[in-house]
Amino acid sequence: MIQGIDYAAIAPPLILAVAAIGLLLADAFDAPRRVLGLASGGALAVALAAVVALAAGDRRATFCLPDGLRSGGPRSCSYVADDFTLLFQGIVLAAAAVVVLLSLQEITDSKIPVGEYHFLLLSAVIGALALVAARDLILLVVALETLSLPVFALVGLRRYDGNASEAALKLFLVSVVSAAVMLFGISMVYGATGAMHLDRIAPALEDLPADLDPVAAVGVVLVLAGFGFKVAAVPFHFWAPDVYQGAPLPVAAFLSVVSKAAGFAGLAIVLALGFPAYAHVWGPLVAVLAAITMTLGNLLALRQRTAIRLLAWSSVAQSGYMLAPLSVGTHRLPEAVAATTAYVALYAVMNLGAFAVVIGFHRRPGARAYDTLDDFRGLARSSPAVAAALAFFLICLAGLPPGVMGLFAKVVVFRATVAGDVTWLAVVMAVNTVIGLYYYLVWAARLFAPGPAAGDAAPGLPVRAAIAATAAGALVLSVAPQIVLQTVAQAT
């Protein structure tokens, strides 16, 4: 069996693959650190341009089954560059470019091997790009592991740091367990349906014999559990706070935005395209996971005293909001997927901006290993621009004016949940939104509170560029957040 390859469709990950190998070889010949960093960012920009070019042209698919194997069934392709895929690839590449900017100084300060860092980072991005385009379970698993394996190496690249090594080990163990759980679930789905492509699994599940129904149901649940590890949903979340704290801060930002966005894209694809016939199984389960995730994440965020752990638990809570629309099952499922996608896009800007400011603040003279929230007290007196940026991003995450993009994101998922007749979950979301308001505003208030001024937190040029880019995006989306929803609605 010979499959044709559409190289235009796979251009974004292919560009990054070539760039990753080139950067690793250039580092072997002692290329300057800044040159490697700029080349990494340039490769991401070229890949983003390829995504834009694909979006302007015809949608493409590749690695499709030959005509002789398609008789009596749908046209099955493993890699599809449709509107949904291109939207998520654009989000992933833009966020990864910001992470590269945040990494330039971190690589020097932490004595991280520059070639290995950029090679691993681009490799993880390749996995994310392939994941959002995967339309069969084999490519989906391969893409997930391509995303996951480089990340735990990135977490542990500060070889002299015991906390980083511990965090990398925890992430590695979680990745191995989640991969095993998901593979077991996939094997059960394949055993019941005899198919790997999602467009063949869906009709096979609809006509499944009664004696195979329990097998398929368990397989669907295990696949969902595997994704639960990736997106840090309770009870699969326990790795997130320690890994965020032990990892280099740009890597923590990558985990909280890029890895999470790819994970939710893969989850939405599998549930909507592969398992709609078993919505009665995964719908209530997703609703319970969403409620527990947002509640536990917000309650534990209230108890945090360090900035990174607060952002980690906040990220867990945000996963609950993203899961909520998917709990509607097949009832208004396209609208639910659009709501989750819109929230992921808006969250990426808000959270990446908050991480960018925290990274800039952490580089001030005399910074602690882990900055406490009290360290930010009086920051507006010494660094008013940095304090204003952080306050704006926290207000966006809280969903208050002028950062109304956060409020718009929560309204979108709230509306989709209510429209799907999961009213009790909408009530839980409303309560948790109030809880989230408290700890975001308490942190923002510390920035302008009286007291000794925090040390000078003027970040370097790359971090300032990252903060400016995310702040500009957040301001634009706060003025017209419906742009995101319109774009997502067309894509889904």
Image (tube, rainbow, N blue to C red):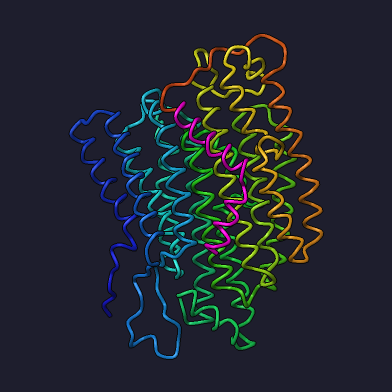
Q: Position of residue 348 (x, y in %)?
A: 55, 44
Q: Position of residue 285 (x, y in %)?
A: 70, 64
Q: In percent of the image, x 28 and y 34: which residue is there?
A: 36
Magenta part mainly helix, strand or loop? helix
Q: Position of residue 306 (x, y in %)?
A: 63, 27
The magenta-colored residue range is 464-492
Q: Residue furthest front?
A: 479
233 to the left or right of 40: right
345 over 132 or under it: above or below: above
The answer to if 468 sits in the magenta stretch is yes
Q: Residue furthest left?
A: 29
Q: In percent of the image, x 43 and y 52: which residue is there?
A: 147
147 over 33 or under it: above or below: below
156 over 272 or under it: above or below: above
The answer to if 339 sits in the magenta stretch is no
181 to the left or right of 152: right
Q: Position of residue 146 (x, y in %)?
A: 40, 54
Count of marks, rendered view: 0
Q: Quadrant of the C terminus?
A: bottom right
Using the rendered view, name the quadrant where residue 59 is placed: bottom left
379 to the left or right of 451: left
Residue closest to the eye, 241 or 25: 25
Q: In percent of the image, x 45 and y 27: which residue is there?
A: 463
Q: Quadrant of the N terminus?
A: bottom left
Q: Residue furthest top?
A: 452
